[in-house]
Amino acid sequence: MSDSNSTDFTNPTTFILLGIPSLETAHVWMSIPFCTMYTIAIFGNFTILFIIKTEPSLHGPMYYFLCMLAITDLVLSTSIVPKMLSIFWFYSREINFSACLTQMYFILSFFFTQSGILVAMAFDRYVAICDPLRHSTTLTNPMVAKIGLAVVLRGIMLILPHLFLARRWPYCRTNIIPNTYCEHIAVVKLACADISLSSYYSLSVAFLVIGQDVFFIALSYTQLCVILAFYIPHLFAALTQRFGHNVPLHLRVLMANMYLLVPPMLNPIIYGVRIQQIRDRLLQLFVLPLLCLFP
């Protein structure tokens, strides 16, 4: 009988997502800003993709990278918000074990993919400014495709060890996750084993890869507000999950959600405003028809 129980715990069928601990009574109200951010992210990123696809003059390296960024934004936000809202609105807290690991993998792999895309965009900007005569010959369409493939493969390969380790740990403590999604460290903390390997690998990847990416981006960009909004909350969440025992749990959960939701909402707004061609196309799509309707 004890063997059967042990097997059940070691191979949990489902996990229970609590949402934001100690703020359960405010879940419905908190769903409003989260739903608003998700709506803006979906609308903004699909608009960017539509404009670049339908405007031949935007078929160039910078805009291809912007399309990749929009896709990763859509995947990141969609990986967490629908389940989060189902918790807030319908108390649907259960998530299948395999679905939980899949969500964790998508979030981590696309996070690092997006980081690589930001580096590629910084490289494109650097070449355009420092060596404009060779920009068109250096960043050709095949080269952009190779860079995009390399960035995606890097995200996939870096995160595979997280998935393999998370799947092999025996889970015999509880199946309750105090979060709105299956955050990596929140999941492996439930294992009744020494998870040092998962923890050290996770921290090493976070600091080495993100540190390297931030360094290369900083060489190209001087205004880093959006970049910092992408990286700092992630590093804060990673550190507080391991060492910030004095930080309130609900604050840790909120930060873990912010770094995945704020950049997808801000990226299309920031880049849409900064890039002249996209700004002009937006005016043609939305502003001019309104002026015709209301002269």
Image (cartoon, rainbow, N blue to C red):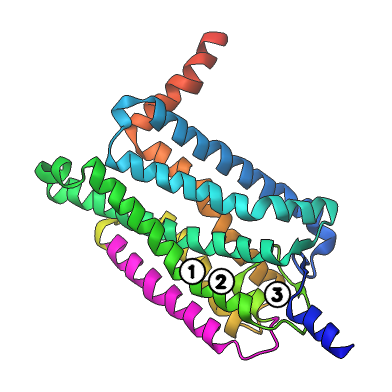
Look at mark 3 in the image and give the residue it sits on: 249
User: Which amino acid type is shown beneath numbered disc 3?
Assistant: Leu
Q: Residue at image x 68%, y 61%?
A: 99
Tell me where residue 3 appears, x and y as whole percent: 83, 88
Separation (CA) of disc 1 from disc 3: 25 Å
Crowdedness of circle 3 by 10 Å Cα count: few (<14), some, many (20+)? some
Q: Nearer the N terminus, badge 3 or badge 2?
A: 2
Look at mark 2 in the image and give the residue it sits on: 163
| In this rendering, the label closer to the viewer, 3 or 2 | 2
State whether residue 245 appears in this view: yes
User: Which amino acid type is shown beneath numbered disc 2?
Assistant: Leu
Q: Quadrant of residue 180?
A: bottom right
Q: Residue at image x 30%, y 42%?
A: 62
Q: Residue at image x 58%, y 85%?
A: 243
Magenta region, residue range: 190-218
User: Which amino acid type is shown beneath numbered disc 1?
Assistant: Ile
Are the residues at dot 2 and dot 1 in contact (C-beta closer than 8 Å)? yes
Q: Which quadrant of the rendered structure holds the N terminus?
A: bottom right
